[in-house]
Image: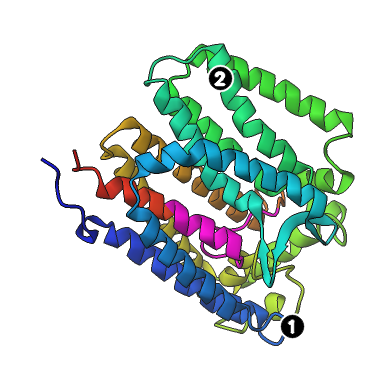
């Protein structure tokens, strides 16, 4: 007997943690952009968050099995949009990543993540959870690899890297064997060395970003500048922080783009170790609730969808926070639900909408 579907089945504790994180984001975007030409960005962030939350509720009511059916069409549409970015995209700071739709800047590479989560989940769910063959692994690599290369050509190394966790999660949950995984790791390492040595795929500034975190003092005013200023900001925050709107690195314009890539550094400077730990605990709680929802999903496709989304969020959080504290290279990956940006915020909320979708149908037959 079909159980009545209602918002009583919504994961309200998860949504509460997300709302708290969004409030901290708006607060820090306001602080980081005050007295600059970006001073109204917190208002835009609120608009994107409200729009994202509305989209989350709408998406949670559409049966995720229908979304899986639409995934192949969406995949090809967004693949064409990535090609369109290369041809007619708006160039900002040397990169073509956006398509202008009137007053709105549309970044297809962010939306592709959600489409890939659905497409990869559909692909491995159709295999029935059995051990995958090399042919099936190759098809999965092709599915994710094509948009990765298109985004890398924009060039946008950070966003292209966020597609990889979706593939890894799909392979891991889809039935890859230990032997196959070992071979892929060896081949991947060899390919990475080849790409690095060729000098034709990664640009010099991208290589500098990937290596400067090891010793930023080697080029303190060049490739190491961002990491050095970020470390100074985080360290100067101490235990309790300098206070709202009182970060000297942030408001002295030493910390680069403190409202996007380095928002965690700006927040840590103003709210200290305690504030930084609180944010990380919020992320931990969100990820744990999502994993719990994946475990209680009624079928394999539902679990694959949520875990694909979890893989992207986990990767972005680890890389962004690691970048800020000097453990990871600077790759331009935003902090989910904290960094300013419409496309990034919408992806996070729509991903949450699909996850809620799976949860709300865990008792529906």
Foreground residue, 114 or 278? Answer: 114
Q: Position of residue 249 (x, y in %)?
A: 71, 75
Looking at this view, is 103 or 296 the one in front?
Answer: 103
Q: Which residue is mark 1?
A: 37
Residue 3, horizontal then vertical, whole percent: 14, 47
* Residue 365 visible from this viewpoint: yes
Which residue corresponds to the image point at 73% horizontal and 40% vertical from the top-left?
150
Q: Which mark is residue 137?
A: 2
Tag 2, which secondary structure? helix
Circle 1 crowding by C-alpha within 10 Å: few under 14, some 14–19, many from 20: few
Pointer 1 and pointer 2: residues touching (CB < 8 Å)? no
Residue at 46% in and 72% down: 50
The magenta-colored residue range is: 332-351
**Of helix, strand and loop, which one carries label 1?**
loop
| Placement of 252 over or under 187, stated as above or below | below
Please indicate whether residue 150 sits to the left or right of residue 348 in the image: right
Q: Quadrant of the N terminus?
A: top left
- Picture coordinates of residue 279 (x, y %)? 46, 63
Taking the spot 64% from the left edge, 72% from the top edge, the residue there is 236
Residue 72 x/y as whole percent = 53, 35
Q: Residue furthest left?
A: 1
Q: Residue at x 51, y 75 (%)?
A: 46
- In primary-sequence order, the first of circles 1 and 2 is 1
| Disc 1 to disc 2, C-alpha distance | 48 Å
- Toward the bottom, the furthest residue is 35
**In the displayed structure, does residue 326 sit left or right of residue 48?**
right
Judge from the rendering whether residue 57 lies leftward or rightward of residue 222; answer left or right: left
Residue 284 can be seen in this image: no
- 205 part of magenta stretch: no
């Amino acid at each position: 007997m079909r159980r009545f579907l209602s918002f009583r089945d919504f994961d309200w504790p998860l949504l509460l943690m997300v709302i708290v994180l969004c409030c901290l984001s708006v607060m820090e975007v306001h602080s980081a952009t005050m007295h600059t030409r970006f001073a109204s960005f917190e208002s835009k962030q609120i608009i994107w968050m409200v729009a994202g939350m509305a989209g989350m509720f709408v998406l949670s009511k559409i049966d995720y099995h229908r979304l899986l059916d639409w995934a192949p069409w969406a995949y090809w549409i967004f693949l064409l949009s990535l090609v369109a970015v290369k041809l007619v995209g708006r160039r900002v700071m040397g990169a073509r990543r956006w398509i202008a739709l009137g007053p709105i800047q549309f970044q297809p590479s962010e939306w592709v993540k959600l489409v890939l989560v659905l497409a990869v989940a559909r692909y491995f769910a159709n295999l029935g959870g059995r051990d995958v063959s090399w042919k099936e692994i190759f098809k999965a690599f092709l599915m994710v690899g094509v948009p990765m290369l298109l985004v890398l050509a924009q060039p946008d190394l950070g966003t292209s890297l966020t597609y990889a966790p979706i593939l890894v999660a799909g392979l891991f949950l889809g039935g890859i064997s230990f032997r196959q995984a070992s071979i892929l790791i060896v081949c991947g390492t060899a390919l990475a060395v080849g790409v690095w040595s060729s000098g034709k795929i990664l640009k010099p500034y991208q290589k500098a970003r990937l290596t400067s975190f090891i010793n930023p003092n080697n080029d303190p005013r060049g490739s190491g500048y961002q990491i050095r200023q970020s470390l100074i900001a985080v360290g100067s925050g101490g235990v309790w922080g300098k206070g709202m709107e009182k970060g000297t690195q942030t408001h002295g314009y030493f910390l680069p783009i403190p409202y996007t890539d380095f928002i965690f550094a700006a927040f840590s400077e103003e709210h200290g170790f305690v504030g930084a730990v609180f944010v990380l605990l919020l992320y931990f709680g969100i990820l744990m609730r999502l994993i719990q929802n994946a475990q209680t999903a009624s079928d394999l496709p539902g679990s694959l969808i949520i875990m694909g989304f979890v893989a992207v969020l986990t990767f972005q959080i680890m890389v962004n926070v690691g970048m800020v504290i000097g453990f990871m290279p600077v790759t331009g990956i935003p902090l989910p639900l904290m960094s300013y940006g419409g496309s990034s915020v919408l992806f996070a909320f729509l991903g949450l909408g699909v996850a809620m979708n799976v949860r709300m149908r865990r008792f529906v037959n």
